[in-house]
Amino acid sequence: MVEDVIGNEGDRILGRDAQRNNILAARVVSETVKTTLGPMGMDKMLVDRVGNVVVTNDGVTILDEMEIEHPAAKMVVEIAKTQEKEVGDGTTTAVMLAGKFLENAEKLLDMKIHPTVICRGYRWAGDKAQEILGGLAVDIGSRDELVKVAQTAMTGKGVEYLREKFGEIIVDAVDVVAEGNRVDLGDVRIEKQKGRAIDESELIRGVVIDKERINLDMPSRVENARIALIEEALEVRSPEMDARISVSTPEQLTSFLGQEDLVLKEKVELIRGSGANVVFVQKGVDELVQHYLAKAGIYAVRRVPRSDMQNLAKATGGKIVSKLSEIASGDLGNAELVEERKDGEDGMTYVMGCSNPKAITILIRGGTEHVVDEVERAVEDALGDVSAAVRYSKVVAGGGAVEIELSRRLREYARGLSGRERLAVEEFAAACEFVPTTLAENAGMDPIDVLTELRTAHDSGGRDMGLNLFSGGIEDNMVGGVIEPLKVKTQAIASATEVAIMILRIDDVVAARKSEGRGGKVGNMSGYD
Ligand SMILES: Nc1ncnc2c1ncn2[C@@H]1O[C@H](COP(=O)(O)OP(=O)(O)OP(=O)(O)O)[C@@H](O)[C@H]1O
Ligand SMILES: [Mg+2]
């Protein structure tokens, strides 16, 4: 595997060997994810040492789960992470391009072209590529186009056969949280529920908490909810405290229990007094408190994770109260309805019609954990793409269309160059064609035939002609609806170029000494020890 690529004979690799070694490592990473690209890409099953299994098609997830030691390979993995962070999709593409840039650079190195020249050529090509991509992009016109963007993102992932349904859900979700061109995906909550079919997934206009009400005597449905969010435990003693109480007479015991009862009752009174009819507690709730809450007709949920508490606060306009004694009616949040629904393995609490109209949850359902997790990754990719399309309002044709046109125009640009950099620009251009050829290869088509056909189509002016793997042919993908946000492509090209240049500039790999104690920061990029 990747670790084996780096030699063990010493702790320093120099010159051409260092380059070869680094390039090889980066290519191994690229080759690993390559087979997952596109609608016909395969999935990978990742099994860790204790036998946990993840089945996925998502580039960044695969690389994240793999144990990668080689420093250059790690640098390539980093770009997948950046891509994920910046756009949320296109991680496989970015990594594959980086691998191909390096592979092609090696040909030039073999021709004794100096790495500095290659790097310069790549830099020029990378800059030119941004300009060309900008020119190829079109403004996003309609909601329908956004749905297509979402669907393109999900092809080849676990939810492909439900692309239409999820396409709508995702565009609706982004629509709810968007303010003009600003989209904060942090506002879109994803909740997962095992036990039902994927096609029963839905968009909930509110917050869904994966918890039931504590006690069956509590109402299962509260309209016009006034919601208290409480951090402290509704118990007499916190379970962490180990107190010893000594009583010597039955009277003492009764009075002690009576006291305890009083304290608990008081807590419920405070909640009631604030006007709350629903309460979410971050910690535990004593049985007696449960009883009193039920008697007061209050819906209560306990052990709600902090992140859910924060979501609830944001959605309902409530404030998380750390000390119950300080609760006031102004701290309460509002929702039209709080209800327990038991439609999966366990009941969930739905908080609907929240005072913040941006409260939205994509509820993903599916038969098993593996299914639900992979659907979640596909949904996240699509959310990333749709929000990138909304933020930058530009899209390009997918299925390799944009890459072929980019490659063609970069070759044209190269023709105007005179130095050896021209060769580097040409190799860069050739590398871009790796996207359509891989899409074809993964679909069992002949990559050379497809490439030739695509080039011919583009030479005769069909700039959006790409592979449409649903119809199985080459067509105008703007029309066919295989579209992607421009940002996925610009980000992938930019980071792939950057990492390729970075790796090419290395001609000496030294096992750096580990930083000891509080001394200066010495990064360990070697992966030797
Ligand atoms: N119907 C289709 N026909 C042809 N190509 C398609 C189709 N739908 C999507 N594609 C292409 O598939 C590629 C994306 O594949 P994929 O989602 O597997 O990888 P990625 O987006 O680079 O990485 P990841 O999704 O793992 O982060 C894009 O080039 C896209 O244009
Ligand atoms: Mg993708």
Image (cartoon, rainbow, N blue to C red):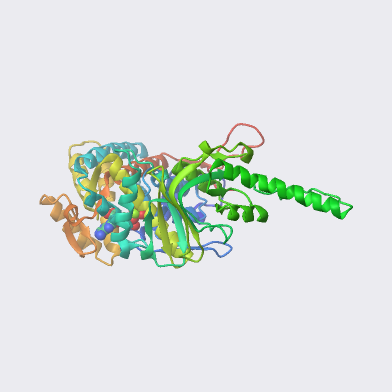
Q: Quadrant of ligand 2?
A: bottom left
Point 42% across, 55% down: residue: 28
For the residue pair 303 and 101, the one nearer the viewer reads as: 303
Q: Is residue 20 above or below residue 445?
A: above
Q: Residue at x 59, y 59 (%)?
A: 215
Point 62% across, 49% down: residue: 283
| Position of residue 258 in the picture relative to residue 432 (left or right) | right
Residue farthest to the left, as pictured: 460
Task: Residue at 32%, 63% (x, y): give it.
Answer: 162
The x and y percentages for residue 379 are 37, 55
Q: Nearer the viewer, residue 248 or 282?
A: 248
Q: Is 365 situated left or right of 408 in this image? A: right
Residue 118 at what x, y percent from top left? 32, 40
Residue 471 pos. (x, y %): 20, 64
Judged left or right of residue 67, residue 250 is right
Could one spot residue 431 in this view of the protein? yes
Q: Could one spot residue 108 in this view of the protein?
A: no
